[in-house]
Image (tube, rainbow, N blue to C red):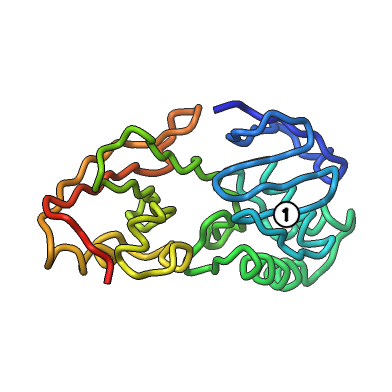
Amino acid sequence: MNTLRTSWSTTSSIRQHRPVSTSTSSDHVIATGDLVINARSREVILHGDVVDVTKTEFDLLVIMATHPRQVFTARQLFQFVWSSQYFDADHVIETHISRLRRKLGESGSHPRYIHTVRGVGYRFEPRPEFDSHPDQPDGSYQVRLAPDLTVADIDPRLAEVLGVDRHRCEGEFIAELLQGLTATAHLHFTTKPVRDESGILVGIQLEVTPRNSLVAD
C-alpha cells in the first residue's frame, strides 16, 4: 500500500505525525478500507456514498484519521477543534463522536474506524482494502476479519448466498455468520494475517471454500 502524509491546519499542533495506510496517492485524500476523506472538497465518502457530516464532525475525523492508532483524550480533541479549554469537554466530544459513528455505520459497541480506549479517549483504526482475487477458484469467497474475529468486510457473493445485507453483517462474529452454511456444506478455511506497514496485525483474510455447491434460496 502507498502511504499518505497529510498536513491540515486543524492538526498543525500535533507532533509525531503517523501516516494512514491508503490506496490513494494524493496530498488531500485519505482512503482506508471503504472510507474516503477528501480535504479539498471536505467530503466523507463511505461505500461510494457521500456522508452528510457537520464541520465539527469532519474536523474530528480528520484529526484522528491523520494520526491513526494515536489515542486522543476528549480534552485534546476539543482543543484541536475549538482552540480553547472547556470544563465539559468529555461530554461535548462524546456527543459529536457518537453522532459521527452513527453516520459511519458503527457504534461504540461495534466500532469500525473510531475506537474507544476506556478511561483515556479515542483512536482511529485504519482498515485494509478488501482483497478480492480475480483468479480465486469458483465457489470460494473472501472475508476480511478484524483481529477479534468479527467481520470487517465480506465478498458480496457470499452475502448473497447467506441472504444477508453485506454491510449489516459487519461486526458480527464469523462463526455466527457462517452457521447457516455449516449445515449444508463442509467448509474449508484458509487464513492469512493482514498487517500494516509497521507490522501491526490489522485483520485476517479468510477464504471460505464450501465442498458442496451452494445455491442461494
Q: Quadrant of residue 169?
A: bottom left
Left or right of residue 7: residue 172: left
Whether residue 161 is situated above or below residue 125 in the rendered picture: below
Pick the front one: 118 or 146: 146
| Residue at (34% x, 42% y) in the render | 205
Quadrant for the N terminus in the image = top right
Residue holding disc 1: 44
10 Å crowding of disc 1: few (<14), some (14-19), many (20+): many
Please report the residue visible at 57 percent of the width from the left and 66 percent of the height from the top. Answer: 105
Q: Nearer the viewer, residue 54 or 148?
A: 54
Question: Can you tell which quarter of the image residue 56 is in?
Answer: bottom right
Quarter of the figure with the C terminus: bottom left
Residue 18 pos. (x, y %): 65, 33
Relative to the observer, which residue lies in front, 133 or 13? 133
Look at the numbered disc 1 and give the secondary structure of its residue. Answer: strand
Residue 101 in the image, given as x and y percentages of width and height: 62, 66
Q: Position of residue 30 (x, y in %)?
A: 69, 40
Question: Which residue is painted at 77% across and 64% down in the image?
Answer: 53
Picture residue at 36% right of the left edge, 63% below the top:
160
In the rendered view, would you say 170 is above or below 91?
above
Tell me the kind of residue under disc 1.
Val
Closer to the camera, 88 or 178?
Answer: 178
